[in-house]
Each structure stands twice: as C-alpha cells, then as structure tokens.
Amino acid sequence: MTDLAVNLVFQLLQMLLVVGLAPLLTGLVRKAKARLLRREGPPLLQPYRDLARLARKEAVVAEGASWLFRVAPYVVLAATWVAAALIPTFATGLLFSWSADLIAIIALLGAARFFLALAGLDVGTSFGGLGASREAMFATLAEPAMIVIVFSLALIAGSTQLSTVAAFMASSAVGLRVTLGMALIALIIVALAENGRIPVDNPATHLELTMVHEAMILEYSGRHLAVIELASMLKLLLYISLIVCVFAPWGLAIADAGVGDRLFGAVVYVVKLGVAGLMLATFETSIAKMRVFRVPDFLGAALMLGFLGALLLFVSRTLK
C-alpha cells in the first residue's frame, strides 16, 4: 500500500475509533459511579443498546416544529464528530492533521451549541427556552476561557495546530510551567461545564429547576434523540481526548511512524480513556452539584486562571 492509502486508512480508523468508543466511555463512567455508590449499575454496553433502541423508534415531531428542529441533531452530530476526529488520539501527522487546529475545534463546538440552542427554541416550549438561555449564558464564559487557554498554549508551543502542540508537550523542552498547570485546571472546568457534568449539571436527572442540556432536547424522540445522545457522548470523549493529547501525550505515535507504533498508540489511548473515565466517576461521586446561579462564578474561575496563566507567561518572558 502507498503512504497515502496507509494514512487514509489510519485517518478513517481514528474517525471510527472515537465514535465507537464514545458510548463505551459513557457506560464506564456510569458503571464506575454505581459501583462507588455500592450499586450494581448498568452494564458497560448499555449505552449501545439504548442508542439502538432509540434508533428503531419512530421520531415524534411537534406540530409547530420547523425544518430546523429535524436538521439540528444531524448538524450537531456532524460538527462534534468532525471535531473529535481531528484531535490526535493515537498518532500525530495523520492525513487531515493540518486541519486539526484548536481554533477550528472551538468553532465546530460553537456551531454545534448554536444549532442545539436554536432547536430548543424552535418548538416554543418553556423548558426549551430555559435550557437555551442557560446554555447561551454559560457559553459566554466557556468560550472566552477556551480562547485564553488556546492563546497560552500557542505562546508556549508556537502553534495552535494540535499535532505540533502534542509533539512539543511530549518533548523535553516543555519543562515545568505554572501556565500549563493553570491551563489544565481551566480546561477541566470548561470540560465539566460544556458536558453538563457534576458540579455544573447532573446528566442522570431531569430536574426542571437546574437542567440545561436536557431541557433543550426534551421534545426529541426516536432516531433524533439517538443522534443527539451520541453527539453528547462524543463531546465528552472529545474533551477528554483534548486534555490527554495536550497534557498527557505519552504513547502518541509521531508523524510517519510505523503501523506497529500507531496500533500501540491506539491501545495506550484506550487505556488513557479508561483512566480518565474512572477519575471522572470518582470526582462526581465525591462532590455535590452546585446551584445554577453559581455556575458563572465556576466558569469565571476558569477564565481568570487562563488570563493569569497568560499574564505569568508574558511576565516571565519579559524578565529574561
């Protein structure tokens, strides 16, 4: 096989890997949380069964829904899937790695959020509008925090291209930097908020006073709901993959690596996902959910950490 064919095969493998592992990651988190609470919990493969069951059901659409309500789930899934597939999971320098830019990934996630919020408003229900307004409010702090984090990483690595950032972070030139620690904490805060995890939201409940993501999708059913649920699972995997790629790039196969190195990188990536899923489950069972009015303060801390990290980076360079 030619180099182009090999690169195309591994790029397709990455696209299938992220969409295939996303439900398994969600199942692992649910199972681990249940075991930590001394319950049996659902099977690891239960998310796959739930998606298959929803896909077989008929989609019931409200009378007042427009074409946007029907199209939004597929747009959200497409944007999230592309963003997740662009992040180097097991190897850098893949066929489409030139487009794996942090700013492009933020733009794709913003587009997915925009269409989901529009879908929540489209039917005209009170819960849909409530969820869309809260999602927009949280996004006004989460997106600036992400931009500041990307700015700090770009100043350190010299690029916003993820393969370049991962290669730099894996080298000995990175050293110990306070800015990276602050960026990591800020990115974890943003990831928790964007995925509606505890302490921001509880994805396992439908409490009307606090729900955000669930409020926007209450009117969906059948295959539409299956697509949105898969996109939500992909988003969780996306943020974990981003954290692992930037701050724990060990095991990543370098550009032009052999087939064996890339397959080994895929195995290491699966192990990292498992460890991250267990850590998330442990964190969620050891902390309480905060009031919804305190979420802006929570995200504001991420924004301030990002700004402070960038400021410290500028100060340290000025003193040299």
Image: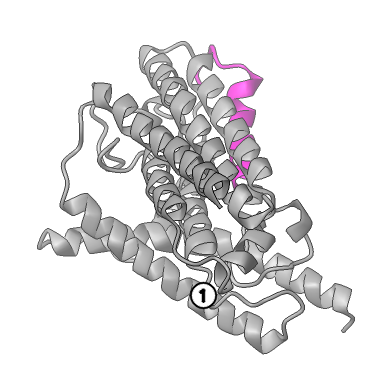
Q: Residue furthest front?
A: 319
Most foreground residue, 226 or 100: 100
- The local secondary structure at tag 1 comes to loop
Along the line of sight, the residue nearer the viewer: 51 or 156: 156
Q: What's the residue at 57%, 84% (across, down)?
A: 264
Taking the image as shown, residue 119 lies to the left or right of residue 182, namely right
Is 65 within the magenta?
yes
Q: Is residue 282 left or right of residue 132?
A: left
| Along the viewing direction, whichever of 77 and 148 lies nearer the viewer | 148
The correct choice, above or below, for 199 with respect to 28 in the image is above
Residue at x 48%, y 21% (from the top left corner): 120
The secondary structure making up most of the magenta span is helix
Query: Which residue is pictured at 46% across the width and 30% down the height?
Result: 220
Quadrant of residue 210 within the rendered picture? top left
Question: Residue 164: x, y in percent?
Answer: 68, 61
Residue 8 position, x and y percent, is 80, 69
Residue 230 rendering spot, x and y as whole percentages: 50, 48
Q: Quadrant of the N terminus?
A: bottom right
Q: Say whether residue 50 is visible.
A: yes
Total marks placed: 1
Badge 1: how crowded within 10 Å, few (<14), some, or many (20+)? some
State which region is magenta: 62-80
Q: Amino acid at mark 1?
A: Trp
Q: Position of residue 6 (x, y in %)?
A: 80, 77
In reply to whether residue 270 is colored magenta, the answer given is: no
Q: Which residue is rendered at x = 56% and y = 53% of the image?
A: 320
Q: Provide the residue designation for mark 1.
A: 250
